[in-house]
Amino acid sequence: MNRLLTFALFLLANAQLVHAVTVFIDFNGGDNSPMSVTINSDIQWTITGERPGSNCGFMIQSPGNPFAGNTYESTSTSFFNTSSTATDYHFLAIASGATNQDATPNDLFFYNLSLSGDMRTGDIVNFFAGTLTTSINVAAAAPEDGYYNVELITGSFYIIPSTASVVVPEPSSFAAGAGLLALLGTALIRRRRKAN
């Protein structure tokens, strides 16, 4: 039992020592309509090393190349901020098909070019879950929903050395959710009793 617990703690401790994090992503639209990408988790990166290239963006690894090498303007409910700025940046563009530096043609990118200046060691980048939607129609079909790796990258398509983790809700959020489930369960039981 102690070995299993030690192994589980080791995995937990080292789960955040990677620069990519795996999250569930929904893709909708396309086929000659606007395409939307919904990332369902908040993510936090702590930068551990510097790479050339100003700005920062995000790369979803290998969902395909739905934008065929083009960049599409987008609107977003998702946004990000950094510990070195007091600004929330919404994503203004989404693209796929890049082949430079750490990118492959099947990776998908989203970014806001307003954030300038290199990211520095120790900076924290907070990504907030939400949806990006292209402002015009996309000819290709949307990629499959599923779990994908998300990387923090520079504007020059270098992966930024960092540790990444999915932000876990506060215990109070779990308590509120449990309370809501209890209320719904009570209402359901009462409704069934009335029906009988």
Image (cartoon, helix red, strand yellow):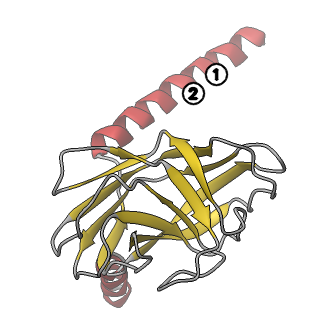
86 horizontally vs 156: left or right? left
Rendered image: mark on residue 185: 2
Q: Quadrant of the C terminus?
A: top right
* Residue 31 drawn at (x, y percent): 84, 50
Category of crowding for the residue at label 2, using alpha-carbon neighbours closer than 10 angstroms: few (below 14), some (14–19), many (at least 20) = few
Residue that label 1 marks: 188
Q: Secondary structure at mark 1?
A: helix
Q: Residue at x 18, y 51 (%)?
A: 85
Q: Residue at x 72, y 67 (%)?
A: 68
> Residue pushed farthest top?
194
Q: Residue at x 83, y 47 (%)?
A: 32
Residue type at mark 1?
Leu
Judge whether 120 appears above or below 4 on screen.
Answer: above
* Residue 4 drawn at (x, y percent): 38, 85
Residue type at mark 2?
Gly
> Residue 65's image quarter?
bottom right
